[in-house]
Image: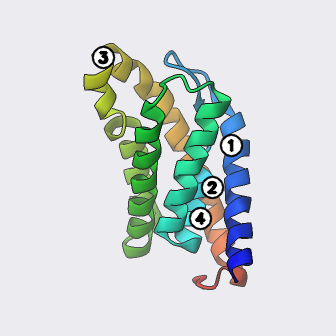
Amino acid sequence: MISRKISVYALFIALSAVGAALKIPSSVGSIGLDSFPSLIAGVLLGGISGGIIAGIGHILSASLGGFPLGPFHVVIGLEMFLLVVVYSWLHKKYSIYIASIMFIIANSVLLPLPFLYVISEKFYFAAIPSLFIAAVLNGGVAAVLLPRLQSIKMWGKSRE
């Protein structure tokens, strides 16, 4: 059972790596599409599992981009972990629509808030448009794929 779990984690981390290679150009560096596998994993495997995949996926994305924000990527990885845990909970408690809207708002406006104070106001406002586009794409891909993947019985807790 442990080897199966590791294999499934590895699959989602590999999907995050592929998404990380798909970059959205930005004035503050490039932003990857590495979140949608963790959103899917969070719903199918549980919030903590999805959060772990989100944190690792962000570090992969940052490494492909040359770590433009240096050690701040650890903070971003932790933020992504928490965001996916909350997304998974909202998806389970309410709906995919509520979870997706929260993800888009949090990922594009709330999570970069520390950089408003740590780096600059200009950096924060320059990052928002690209983060918004990436959040819409990541949330949209997850919203389209999740209902189809939930119908597959292999996840153990699919909804019919």
Q: CA distance from mark 4 to mark 2?
A: 6 Å
In the image shown, does 116 or 128 lie closer to the viewer? Answer: 116
Q: CA distance from mark 2 to mark 1?
A: 8 Å
Q: Earlier in the sequence, mark 1 or mark 3?
A: 1
Image disc number at residue 19: 1
Residue, disc 4: 41
Q: Residue at x 36, y 45 (%)?
A: 106
Q: Earlier in the sequence, mark 2 or mark 3?
A: 2
Q: Residue at x 71, y 60 (%)?
A: 10
Residue, disc 3: 120
Q: CA distance from mark 2 to mark 3?
A: 31 Å
* Mark 3 Cα-neighbour bin, 10 Å: few <14, some 14–19, many ≥20: few
Residue, disc 2: 37
Q: Earlier in the sequence, mark 1 or mark 4?
A: 1
* Mark 2 Cα-neighbour bin, 10 Å: few <14, some 14–19, many ≥20: many
Q: Could one spot residue 17 in this view of the protein?
A: yes
Residue 90, given in percent of the width and then of the height, sits at 38, 66
Q: Residue at x 45, y 54 (%)?
A: 81
**CB atoms of marks 4 and 2 within 8 Å:** yes
> Which amino acid type corresponds to the residue marked 4 in the rendered image?
Ala
Image disc number at residue 42: none
Q: Earlier in the sequence, mark 3 or mark 4?
A: 4
Label 3 element class: loop
Label 2 element class: helix
